[in-house]
Image (cartoon, rainbow, N blue to C red):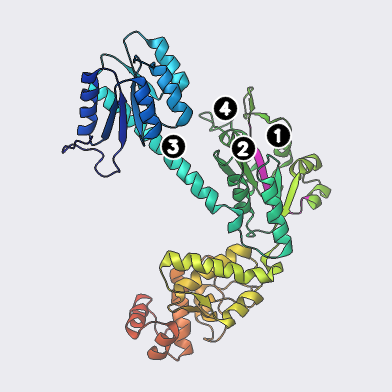
Amino acid sequence: MRRTTCNQFMSNEISKNILIIDDEAGMRDMVSRMFADAGYDTATAPDGAAGLAAAKGGAFDLVVLDMSLPKMSGLEVLAGIKEVKPDLPVIMVTAYGSTQTAIEALRLGAYDYITKPFDLDELQMTAERALEAQRVIDENRFLRGELKKKFGFDNIVGSTPEVQRAYVMAAQVAPTNATVLITGETGTGKEYLARTIHYQSGRAGGPFVKVNCAALSENLLESELFGHEKGSFTHAVARHIGRFEVANKGTIFLDEIGEISLPVQMKLLRVLQEKQFERVGGSETLTVDVRVIAASNRDLADAIKQKQFREDLYYRLNVITLRLPPIRERGEDIEIFAEHFLKIYADETAKKVTRFSPEAVTELRTHDWPGNIRELENTVERAVILCNGETIRPEHLMLAPARSSVPTPASSASGSASSPIQIPVTASLRDVEKIHIERVLKAKNWNQSGAAQALGIDRKTLRNKIREFHLDRDGG
């Protein structure tokens, strides 16, 4: 059954299907007409048995169910629906004064109830709320599924034995609640691995909460982790819920845990041991169910020797340790990562860049990568943007053989046209493009035809770029 009018509020969405189960023909027809006029598809059933069979066999988004029905009671139908389709929202229609029965319906999983006699607008608004709530649930479920696919162990790049061992161990520990410590230099992918462990665990439906321990002072970090009560310190104008509370039923990722002060380490140790803590300035003991994944680019064993890290906390964190080696120790992985990022950014920019030249591969493999995978990703992204053909060449990578100093864009641009360029990490992509075009122009002695050919663009585009960047042969 489908009736449409000009007041469809669902016109820009896929029509929703609503099942109305009521033994009164007049009530069924009235409610069905109301939903059809609002743009919904509707179906009806005259008794509980027929309604339950329809709900089980049909693709419905909402059920409007009368409490008092022949053959089966409304509560029995509700229980039968929830047994097969627990997420299908059900609105109960009850007689006046049946509050206790309505409460029982809510306990069995009904979304809401309305009492007879009711206003049709009230029913429609209740239905809209139920459908919106279900839309949010479905969207969250979809997003969790997408995250689970994105952060899957088969998406992690790496072929060296040490990396493979780390990934195999991570896959084994992911389904458990064990605490994990991930070590490795900045930029080696510690956070990505932590997220992968979370989204491949039974906690994937819960929150993943990251805390950068190095970015906060001792007092701020304590408040951020455990929360604080109003008035517990200056500017504490309201209660603040800490990250451990937010992460309940999920995972908390403590990045750069080696930077935590000794007093905060003591409170963290208690959470790991007892799953309990108090907010700053509070007396109420809170209990949480949180998995802890920690990461550090410091040698925590050395920090223990220097009395900067508690040994008992270290052993609590060190249940499972995963080491991610720097990319300079993963020579065979560099090209794999580069190809991985090339595909990502070629798709993202809709450019037909498909490969690296042999010379570019050599530069990638011989660079020392102080910024690790993060630096490699940024380099490939920049190269894809600068490349106007199918092949990335060394001039698109713009890698310097040494990183002992970081000159400004101006000093880089004014150097010899054949000398390697060093790009500061603060340079924008527009700065990079300008520097590269000016370098090629100098190399071609400002011959625009030759420079355009080298850049993979036509002369008109090059002239527009020269004007855009205010490039001047005499000023260079």
Q: Secondary structure at mark 1?
A: helix
Residue ID for mark 3: 137
2 and 1 marks in contact (CB < 8 Å): yes
Nearer the observer: mark 1 or 3; the answer is 3
Q: What kind of residue is marked 3?
A: Ile
Residue 59 image offset from top left, x and y in percent: 36, 37
Tell me: 1 left or right of 339.
left
Q: Which residues are magenta?
A: 289-300
Of the numbered discs 1 and 3, the one sitting upstream in the chain is 3
Of the numbered discs 2 and 3, the one sitting upstream in the chain is 3
Mark 3 crowdedness (10 Å alpha carbons): few <14, some 14-19, many ≥20:
few
Q: Secondary structure at mark 2?
A: helix
Q: What kind of residue is marked 2?
A: Leu
Residue ID for mark 2: 225
- Position above or below: 144 against 467: above
Residue ID for mark 1: 267
**Quarter of the figure with residue 330:** bottom right
- Position above or below: 422 against 272: below
